[in-house]
Image: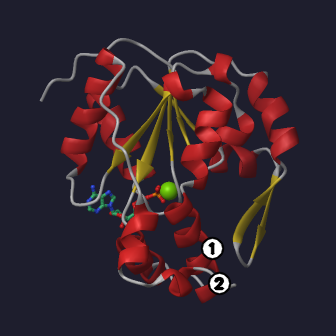
């Protein structure tokens, strides 16, 4: 595989279960010169996060302040909170992993998420909340979506490397259409 790449501060974000940590681990396996900043881990270690039934509740304002104090250089920043704790000037590129909501549901069941949490996270994926918030925080030029559904981790990494080197090649993702076609909006959203 082509592992050449320019050095950048790279964000890997997306909803829970899309494969952020799997890809981050693989990324570091090929390029150990990067340092990882795992946002959730950092939040917990620094007491900006409180564990509750739903996972962790993070004080993003305090977390953002603390992250700004770090030496943001050649970092691989991983977490669904990335758009809320980083600014455009902090990063070079944001990769938003997108995954078919029906596949995500299966992962959430394996993780024993409660039904309400499954709906909330799958709904967020369908609406592309994190993708939109990434574009708001980091700008269109720096935000790239990848549909990881049915892709191998190696294939995804290859695509990330290509995006880093060429600043193009993101996917256009629209799960809403898929869910509408199946007439299953009610499965994910309460009205
Ligand atoms: P996240 O860190 O975004 O929550 P994980 O990396 O923990 O996601 O991956 C969620 C689940 O999906 C794990 O069971 C992982 O093994 C699996 N997974 C991750 N990437 C892929 C892939 N490309 N193809 C198939 N399964 C994957
Ligand atoms: Mg994870």
| Mark sitting on residue 116 | 2
Q: Are marks 1 and 2 in contact (CB under 8 Å)?
A: yes
Residue neighbourhood size for the residue with mark 1, other residues' Cα within 10 Å, grouped as few (<14), some (14–19), many (≥20): some
Where, by quadrant of the figure, is residue 183 drawn? bottom left
Name the secondary structure under disc 2.
helix
- In front: 155, or 183? 183
Residue 183 higher or lower than 54, as above or below: below
User: Can you identify the residue that label 1 sits on?
Assistant: 120
x%, y% of residue 114? 61, 86
The reply to whether residue 55 is visible in this rendering is: yes
Where, by quadrant of the figure, is residue 123 drawn? bottom right
Name the residue: 72% across, 41% down: 84
Name the quarter where the C terminus is drawn: bottom right
x%, y% of residue 179? 41, 74
Residue 116 higher or lower than 49, as above or below: below
Name the residue: 51% across, 51% down: 14
Name the secondary structure under disc 1.
helix
């Amino acid at each position: 595989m082509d592992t050449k790449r320019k050095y950048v501060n790279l964000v890997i974000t997306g909803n829970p279960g899309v494969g952020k940590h799997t890809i981050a681990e693989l990324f570091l396996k090929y390029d150990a010169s990067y340092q990882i900043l795992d946002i959730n881990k950092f939040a917990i270690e620094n007491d900006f996060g409180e564990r509750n039934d739903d996972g962790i509740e993070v004080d993003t304002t305090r977390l953002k302040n603390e992250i700004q104090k770090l030496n943001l250089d050649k970092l691989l920043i991983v977490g669904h909170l990335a758009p809320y704790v980083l600014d455009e000037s902090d990063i070079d590129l944001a990769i938003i992993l997108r995954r078919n909501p029906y596949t995500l549901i299966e992962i959430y069941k394996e993780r024993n998420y409660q039904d309400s949490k499954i709906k909330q996270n799958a709904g967020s994926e369908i609406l592309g909340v994190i993708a939109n918030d990434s574009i708001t925080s980091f700008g269109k030029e720096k935000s790239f979506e990848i549909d990881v559904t049915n892709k191998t981790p190696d294939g995804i990494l290859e695509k990330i490397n290509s995006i880093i080197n060429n600043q193009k090649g993101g996917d256009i993702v629209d799960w809403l259409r898929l869910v509408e076609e199946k007439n299953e909006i009610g499965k994910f959203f309460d009205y």
